[in-house]
C-alpha cells in the first residue's frame, strides 16, 4: 500500500501540469473508444465507459470530443483500432514496472518503451515476470475537505470497501474490483466529489530506493506516463521521507 500511496501522492501534486500538456486527452479518448467498442455506447449500461467519461469530465474535455470517441468505438464514425496490451520490466534499483498500453502499432510502442527503460537504467522483461506482484483493486481519492473521516469511512465500509487511509490532504480508498462500482456509486449518491475513481494495480510488497536510483526512477516514470500509448504505469517502489527531502532540497 505504501508504495502506491507515495506514488499516487506524487501524481496528485503533478496532475495539473500533466493536464496542461494535453497528454491526458489522448489517453482518455483511447479509453473511451475501446470501452465503447467492447461494451457498447450506453454510458449507464457500460461501467468502464462511465468511468472513462467521468475522467473526461474531470479534465474538462469538451463533450464533442467524448461523443466522437464513443461513436468511433461503436463504429458510427471511422476511427483507429487500438489493441490493448501489457508490458513488464524493471526500473533503476530493480523495482518492478507494469504498463497497460493501448496502441495501433505494437512494434513502434514496444521499441519506444524499451528505449525509455534502457535510458534510465531499466530493462524490459518477459510477460508474467512482475504481474504477479500487483493486485488489481478499485481506487478512489477524495479531498478531506469534502467529508468528515468517520462518516466517510462508515459509508465506504457499508458499501463494501476494503480500506481507507488519510494521505496528506486526501482520503485514499481501496476496494475489490467487484465492489468498486458499489463504493463509487455510494459516494456519488452522497454528493461527494472524487478526485480519482479508477481500477488500479497495487503492489503486494514495496522496495525502498535510494536517492540516486530514485531520481532516475521518477524521471523514467514521468517519461513512461507521458507516452501516448501507455494508459497506466505501476511500480512497487517506495520512497522514505528522508530521500524525498533530499531530492526536493537538491531540485
Image: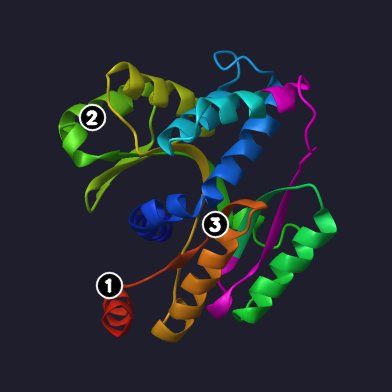
For the magenta stretch, what is the residue range?
A: 71-96
Residue 71 position by quadrant: top right
Identify the mark at residue 152; answer none if there is no mark: 2
Taking the spot 15% from the left edge, 32% from the top edge, the residue there is: 148
Residue 173 lies, with reference to residue 78, above or below; the image says below
Disc 2 crowd, CA 10 A, few/some/many (<14, 14-19, 20+): many
Q: Is residue 38 visible from the viewing direction of this image? A: no
Q: Secondary structure at mark 3?
A: strand
Taking the spot 35% from the left edge, 52% from the top edge, the residue there is: 12
Of marks 1 and 3, which one's residue comes earlier in the chain?
3
Q: Is residue 34 found left or right of 225 in the rendered image? A: right
Please report contact status of discs 2 and 3: CB closer than 8 Å, yes or no.
no
Taking the spot 80% from the left edge, 37% from the top edge, the residue there is: 81
Q: Secondary structure at mark 1?
A: helix
Residue carrying label 1: 241
Location of residue 163 in the rendering, given as x and y in whole percent from the top left corner: 34, 39
Of marks 2 and 3, which one's residue comes earlier in the chain?
2
Residue 186 lies, with reference to residue 89, above or below; the image says above
Amino acid at each position: 500500500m505504501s508504495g502506491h500511496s507515495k506514488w499516487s501522492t506524487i501524481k496528485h501534486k503533478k496532475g495539473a501540469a500533466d493536464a496542461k500538456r494535453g497528454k491526458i486527452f489522448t489517453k482518455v479518448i483511447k479509453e473511451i473508444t475501446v470501452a465503447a467498442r467492447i461494451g457498447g455506447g450506453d454510458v449507464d449500461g457500460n461501467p468502464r465507459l462511465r468511468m472513462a467519461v467521468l475522467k473526461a469530465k474531470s479534465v474538462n474535455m469538451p463533450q464533442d470530443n467524448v461523443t466522437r470517441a464513443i461513436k468511433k468505438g461503436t463504429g458510427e464514425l471511422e476511427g483507429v483500432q487500438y489493441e490493448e496490451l501489457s508490458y513488464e520490466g524493471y526500473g533503476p534499483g530493480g523495482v518492478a514496472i507494469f504498463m497497460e498500453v493501448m496502441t495501433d502499432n505494437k512494434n513502434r510502442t514496444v521499441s519506444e518503451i524499451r528505449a525509455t527503460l534502457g535510458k534510465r537504467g531499466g530493462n524490459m522483461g518477459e510477460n508474467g515476470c512482475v504481474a504477479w506482484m500487483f493486485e488489481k483493486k478499485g481506487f478512489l481519492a477524495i479531498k478531506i475537505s469534502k467529508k468528515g473521516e468517520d462518516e466517510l469511512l462508515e459509508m465506504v465500509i457499508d458499501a463494501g470497501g476494503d480500506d481507507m487511509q488519510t494521505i496528506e490532504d486526501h482520503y485514499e480508498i481501496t476496494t475489490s474490483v467487484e465492489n468498486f462500482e458499489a463504493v463509487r456509486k455510494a459516494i456519488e449518491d452522497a454528493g461527494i466529489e472524487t478526485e480519482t475513481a479508477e481500477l488500479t494495480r497495487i503492489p503486494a510488497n514495496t522496495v525502498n530506493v535510494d536517492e540516486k536510483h530514485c531520481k532516475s526512477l521518477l524521471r523514467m516514470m514521468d517519461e513512461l506516463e507521458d507516452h501516448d500509448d501507455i494508459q497506466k504505469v505501476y511500480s512497487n517502489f517506495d520512497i522514505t521521507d528522508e530521500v524525498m527531502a533530499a531530492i526536493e532540497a537538491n531540485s
